[in-house]
Amino acid sequence: MRFRIISISFETFSHATEDLEKVKEALLKFIPPEISKYIRVVRSTVMGHYKNPIDILRINVTRSDHVSLVVKRLAALISDDDKKRLLMELDRRVDRTGRFYLRFDKQNVYLGNFVISEKGDSIKVVLTISPRPKDLSSLSKFLSELGLIGPSGGNE
């Protein structure tokens, strides 16, 4: 069975104490320059616990040629150590619907360092895979071929 990534979404928050333009700049670092003019950042605002405004910034990439370029960029940005980590954590980074979840440290991304993170102040990246993977072994092989995770090294 041949998989493909049908969409990639990016989401992050900009708190009242942050510079919205810098947060947007960090989010756009995932987008290859050749398609940036086609990409739209969608902004919505919610109220925080203490009535402070929080901006939610989102990018959704669905055009297949754009998805392919973003996947290649992601593969180039993720360090080998983080790719090994993602391979080890694959079972908890994939849901039953075929979505692969990543989080990058927002401050580091702004500085040009794409570090996988678990903390709250992050940029969430969700890759939707079709058809829905039925087992981790085939999914691992697919993501490894794309360069998004470390080599699976299994007996496929």
Image: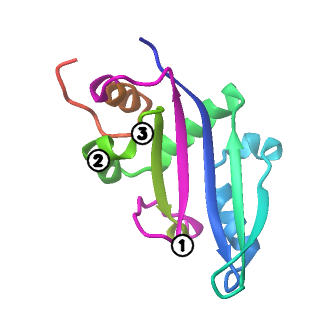
Q: Amino acid at mark 2?
A: Glu
Whichever of callouts 2 and 3 sits on the residue coming sooner in the sequence is 2
Q: Mark 1 against mark 2, which lies toward the viewer?
A: 2
Residue occupying the point 45% across, 14% down: 2
Q: What segment is highlighted magenta in the picture?
A: 109-138
Residue occupying the point 60% across, 40% down: 8
Q: Is residue 56 magenta?
A: no
Instruction: Kindly indicate the quadrant of the structure image that contains residue 146.
Output: top left
Residue 50 lies, in percent from the top left, at: 66, 88
The residue pinned by badge 3 equals 95
Q: Amino acid at mark 1?
A: Gln
Instruction: Kindly indicate the quadrant of the structure image that contains residue 124.
Output: bottom right
Residue occupying the point 78% across, 63% down: 44
Q: Amino acid at mark 3?
A: Asp
The residue pinned by badge 1 equals 107
Residue 83 lies, in percent from the top left, at: 34, 46
Q: Are marks 2 and 3 in contact (CB under 8 Å)?
A: no
Q: In the displayed structure, would residue 146 be above or below residue 56? A: above
Residue occupying the point 45% across, 40% down: 100
Q: Quadrant of the N terminus?
A: top left
Q: Mark 3 against mark 1, which lies toward the viewer?
A: 3
Mark 2 residue crowding within 10 angstroms, few (<14) / some (14–19) / many (20+): few
Q: Secondary structure at mark 1?
A: helix
Whichever of callouts 1 and 2 sits on the residue coming sooner in the sequence is 2
Q: Mark 2 against mark 3, which lies toward the viewer?
A: 3
Q: Is residue 133 magenta?
A: yes
Residue 89: mark in rendering:
2
| 35 lies left or right of 149 | right
| 89 lies left or right of 111 | left
Q: In the displayed structure, would residue 37 be above or below residue 45? A: above
Q: Secondary structure at mark 3?
A: loop
> Who is closer to the viewer here, 31 or 60?
60
